[in-house]
């Protein structure tokens, strides 16, 4: 039950994008297409799970005064693996994401989970937390990317690395290029956060009768 709760926590209650508002820079930058969002989300998930697991295993032997530098070195190791793998297997995606792959090292989502959770919890709980936070981050990127790609290009799920042109949903006259530019990212994120907050607010049971 504890593992399930740790996993589910990152999906809804503490979703890193929609609830904790962490990692906003890559969220706004790469959510221009669903393929980019999935790529960044899976990369972050791999780093989250790997770094959480290692931090949990070595938490008792890391000196308190140098714990943050140690966490960064651990995270950087997994980011290097992701960076090289993406460069080899998905070169177009790797080029599109660019600097945001190495910047996963300093992504506040990754470091926050290492410091706040993995450094204090057992291995399996830390892995479950990493998966939950990573999948929650990926789902948030997919939601934002789906809106922006559809409204900005009229096409969704375009994947150059797999020679797939995507699925056309909107005619050219209905698309708006601003949605795949920086202002579109802020507009989409703001509207999505507003909708989520409105849907999740407590509902009154009705006014009291005199």
Image: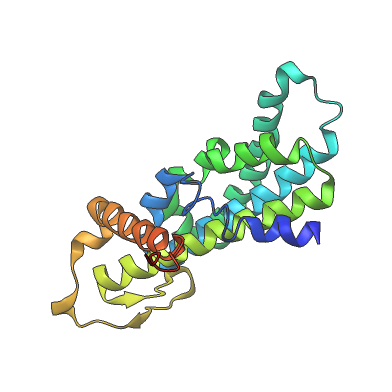
Say left or right for 204 vs 55: left
Q: Horizontal and vertical percent for residue 140?
A: 48, 61
Q: Is residue 88 visible?
A: no
Between 13 and 70, the one nearer to me in the picture: 13
Vertical placement of 139 versus 156: above or below? Answer: above
Q: Nearer the viewer, residue 34 or 113?
A: 113
Colour approach in the figure: rainbow
* Residue toward you, 74 or 57: 57
| Residue 167 seen in the current view | yes
The C terminus - image quarter: bottom left
Q: How far from the left and from the top, in percent, is residue 51?
A: 71, 43
Q: Residue at x 82, y 52 (%)?
A: 124
Residue 30, image x, y percentages = 40, 54
Which residue is at 61% across, 54% downward?
133
- In-front residue for pair 186/200: 200
- Name above or below for residue 27 compared with residue 57: below
Furthest toward the top, the residue is 65
Task: Tell me the quadrant of the picture where the N terminus can be found.
Answer: bottom right
Which quarter of the picture shows residue 43?
A: bottom right
Point out the residue furthest to the front here. 210
Q: Position of residue 18 (x, y in %)?
A: 46, 54
In-image side of 44 versus 31 (left or right) = right
Q: Name the residue located 48 percent from the left edge and 52 percent from the top edge.
A: 17
């Amino acid at each position: 039950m504890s593992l399930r709760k740790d996993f589910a926590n990152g999906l809804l209650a503490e979703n890193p994008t929609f609830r904790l508002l962490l990692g906003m820079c890559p969220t706004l930058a790469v959510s221009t297409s669903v393929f980019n969002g999935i790529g960044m989300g899976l990369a972050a998930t791999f780093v989250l799970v790997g770094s959480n697991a290692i931090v949990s295993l070595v938490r008792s032997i890391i000196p308190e005064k140098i714990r943050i530098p140690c966490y960064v070195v651990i995270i950087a190791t997994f980011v290097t693996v992701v960076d090289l793998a993406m460069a080899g297997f998905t070169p177009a995606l790797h080029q599109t994401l660019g600097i945001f792959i190495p910047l996963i090292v300093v992504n506040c989502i990754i470091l926050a989970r290492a410091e706040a959770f993995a450094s204090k919890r057992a291995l399996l709980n830390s892995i479950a937390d990493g998966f939950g936070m990573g999948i929650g981050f990926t789902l948030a990127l997919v939601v934002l990317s789906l809106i922006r790609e559809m409204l900005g290009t009229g096409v969704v799920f375009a994947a150059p690395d797999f020679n797939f042109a995507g699925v056309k949903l909107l005619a050219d006259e209905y698309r708006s290029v601003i949605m795949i530019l920086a202002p579109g990212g802020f507009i989409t994120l703001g509207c999505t956060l507003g909708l989520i907050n409105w849907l999740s607010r407590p509902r009154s049971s009705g006014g009291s009768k005199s």
